[in-house]
Structures are given as structure tokens and as C-alpha cells.
Amino acid sequence: MVKNNMKSNDIINLEQMKDGLIQFSTGGDFDEIDYEKLRFEILNNTATKKLAPDFLRTRRTLKEFWQLIKNQYSSYAERREFLTTTFNMMIDTLEQSIESSESYIFNLNNRIGGGGFGEVFKIEHQYVEMSFALKVLNPIFPDTDKDYASRFFREAKILFSLNHPNIIKIYDTGINNGKPFIKMEYIEGYDLDQYINKFSTLDFTRSKLPIQMILKGLAYAHNKGVIHRDLKPSNILVSSEGTCKIIDFGISAYLEPYIHTKLTLTNERIAGGSFIDPLLMNTPSLRDKRSDIYSIGAIWYYLIVGSAPIGSDLERRLLASNNISKLQANIILKCLNHSLDERFQNCEEILNAMSPKKEDPLNTSNNWITDVTRLDLIDFLREYHQTALYLTEEDFPFTYSGRYGELEFLNDLYELGNIEGENGMNFTEEIEQHRINNCDWEEFWCLTDDRLKLKDSDENLLRFLSYMFHPKVRYENSSWKYILENINNMLIRDGYKLTPNGEISGKTVYSYERIL
């Protein structure tokens, strides 16, 4: 109880010093004796000495303080804002320390992770029976650096305002046995390092889902003025439900004075290593959201290739990995550009490159669907068609093998008579000749025949997806609902979906519509 009263007196001393200096700096009076007494109490108390600003240490009298404040801040409003911010930060830090010491007794027996700069423990709340993660940071600064705690808590205070499904939730921060800690949401699952080690690398399509979740969380933080600066696979947690959450926002501020050495206490590269923006290695104080963009590209590269982006042949290794196109690789490589100005300028630009939002109505001259989505659709249809080879014809709703019964449908979709066929015939005549010769194409020819322009015409691709559910090719007992669901999950990213549009012979006909 005595200890808590002493801490309460510390806060009172800080509040009185704040009020007195604000009054003195804005034309009022502050007794010289009161200033010297409060200054002595603050600088000779363990709890407040480390938090005291430099001007309080160096300005022994009010006259010396006045010379400083009038030269740095010309207006009353500037002086009031500076003093209020400085002392409120100190008061908040003490209040958090009091709350932590009164509310928690941490059991640090269950260590779940750690590295050069700290350890992570799983702790249980004794009253509400909930699990939390506690990150305890190892002190790495020399004793002569008195301001690191202030920097840390100034950054940590911002983290309490971050509330996003793709950012780990922070519940508390403080100092435990001389070490700063952050108490956060506990996630049952893996970090991305562990995920790749367990399940192997991802193809481009599968890699987009975690990257999109990371980008959404990062965009939210950037819009609040919070930059991570230490993004890496081990700082992305994947829950058992598949949700990605970013951790360790604000830790970079704590590490900043040490970043320029480029070495940890164990002689390893600092912070994110190969995932950190190289510009930060030379300019540790750089605070630019485009540094986080670089880390996004490095993490994305890692998910696909299985290693960090090191060396000069990044494009070659990307293109040799997991069925990725040059267009898709260029999105990742743009994130990794050495020039800040040549990278994507924000998270929204990357999200838009993957799944752009369009404002124009349907127009055949517009590029409605992104190339990424188009490739995803074609890949899905091909993959599903391969799987469908093991099913009966009734299980698969769209097998276009050139049979006469489908000629009317194909002609309606593609105007086959206007497409040049083989041996001087048009496409309609070519299909008819195949019927006569009883020589069908391979089953998924409609997805690969360049004459149908599925590879470079959104209009034809959308029509193809719509007509795929025409009664002539869809069977009620088939798996068309599964196909429709998967297609719409891809189309919706670009603002489209296939929707019911009337009936033919008692069966629903689908067409595409704009939803954004």
C-alpha cells in the first residue's frame, strides 16, 4: 500500500510541474521554490527519473527554462501543447505501470517463442479464464540511454487504438522487472515461417489470400499513421481458422537506436533481416509506409519461392516457381523495387492491382476483369475439368466437345459463322465437319482455342461463364452450384457476379451483373 501511495505522489508531482510550467510559459506565475522542489522530487525518484525530459535535467532554474521555451516556441499555444504532451506521456506511463503491478502477477513458465530481442509467453488470466500472449523485450540499450522507455511507451500508446481483424489486439503494456512488455491477443495457430515449413510453398493464387489480409490490416494501420518497419514471416500469425494477423507494431521504435549497428547481440542481422527494406539499414530513422510495401513483396516472394528475396535473379526464380506468370511476378517485383518512388505507393494500390474497384458501368471497351482474376478463372475451370474426367457426364455441366446438339449454343455465344475455320471453312462448318467425321476435340478445347478469345477478351469470358449455366449444358443434379460459388468468389473481387436472369424450360438462366 505504501508503494502505491508513493507512486500516486509521483503522478501528483508531475501534474503540479506541468501546470506550473504551462502557467509560467503563458504569462502567469510559478514560484521558483516550488519549481526547484518539484524538480528535485522528480529527478531523485526511481519511477520518474528515467522518464524526465532533458530540459528538466538541464534547466536548474525557471530563468534557464524560460530561455529555452521562448526560443523554441514563440506562441502560447505551442508552449502549452509541448508541455501538455510531454508531461501527459510521463503520467500515462506511470499510470500504466501502476495498473500492471496491481492487476497482474505474470506466470512466465509457458514460453512459446522468442528471438534476439525478446521472448513470448502464454499466460492465463486468473479471473476470466482467457489466454493471452505476453511479449517481454530484452533490454538492449546501454544504461546511459535514459529515453528508450519514453520512446517505447509513446509508440505503444498508439497501438491501443488499432482495432482490425488482421492486426493482433493489444491489451496492456508496461515494465516487468525492468523489461518492457506487451500483453496481446493469443492466437492458436502458426506464424508464416512455421506454416511454410509445415505445408510447403504456395502457388500465386493461394498466396493472394494471406497477402490480401496482411495488406488490409497494414492499410488500416497506415491510415492511422502507424508504420510497422519490421514485417517478416514470423510477424504474421495464421489462426486455426485461416485468418492472418500482424504482430509487433511499434517494436521497431524500441529497436531504432540499435538498428544502425545491423547486428543483434547474437551477431545476426537486425530486425527483419532479408525482409526489411534495405533503405532502413542505411537510414534507421526512416519512417515511410513504402518501407512496409517492400516487406510485403519480400513476404510474398517467400510464400511462393520458399526463400527470402536475395540476389539479382529474383524474376527468374519467381517465374520458375509454382506456376506464376510474368504479369503476376511483376506485382511482387514492383513491391521490391530499390527506389521508393518506383514501388507501389500504398497498400490500396497493390490490392487494386490484384482486384481493382471499377466505377464505370459495363462497357465492352473497358478492361473489366484484372489479368490476375482472368488467369485464376481459367486455371480453376481447367483444374475442375480435369477432375471432372473422373465423373459421369451428368456430373459435369459444360463439356463442349463439338457435338451437334451444342452447336446452337456455341454459335449463340461466339457467333461461330464469323470465325475463320480450317481448310477455308468457317468455325460452324468446322464443327459440323467434326460431327460428320465423328472426331471430337479434346474436352476442354473451349478454354484453350485462341479463336474464342477467352484469353484476352473479358466480354467473351463473362459470356462464357454466364452461358455455362444455360439449361442446354447444365443439369440440375450436377455440381454446378459448387462451380458457380467458386467462380463468383473470384469475380466478386472485381465487382461482378453471375446472377439468375429468367428461366428456360423451367430452369434458371444466369447472366453477369455489376455489383460495385
Image (tube, rainbow, N blue to C red):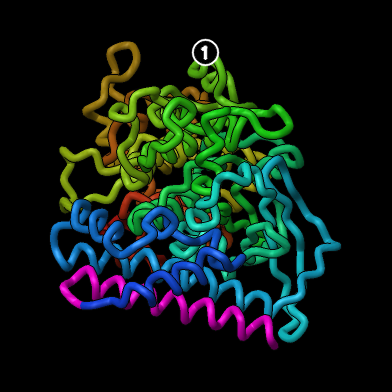
Residue 472 visible in the picture: no
* Amino acid type, label 1: Asp
Relative to 475, 502 lies left or right: left
What is the quadrant of residue 64 in the picture? bottom left
Magenta segment main secondary structure: helix
Q: Which residue is under mark 1?
A: 313
Q: Is residue 168 above or below residue 433?
A: below
| Image location (x, y in percent) of residue 79 | 23, 64
Q: Is residue 29 above or below residue 269?
A: below
Residue 361 visible in the picture: yes
- Between residues 201 and 158, which one lies in front from this camera angle? 158
Q: Which residue is at a point 38% across and 77% down the rendered structure image?
A: 34
What is the quadrant of residue 435 in the picture? top left
Q: Is residue 268 magenta?
A: no
- Between residues 337 and 102, which one lies in front from this camera angle? 102
Name of the residue lying farthest toward the front: 33
- Between residues 85 and 23, which one lies in front from this camera angle? 23
Q: Which residue is at a point 56% across and 36% down the rendered structure image?
A: 258
Local crowd size for mark 1, using a 10 Å CA cut-off: few (<14), some (14–19), many (≥20): few
Q: Is residue 8 magenta?
A: yes
**The magenta segment:** 1-28
Q: Is residue 419 above or below residue 231?
A: above
| Image location (x, y in percent) of residue 14 | 44, 74
Q: Which residue is at a point 48% across and 22% down the rendered structure image?
A: 437
What is the quadrant of residue 349 in the picture? top left
Relative to 18, 244 lies left or right: right
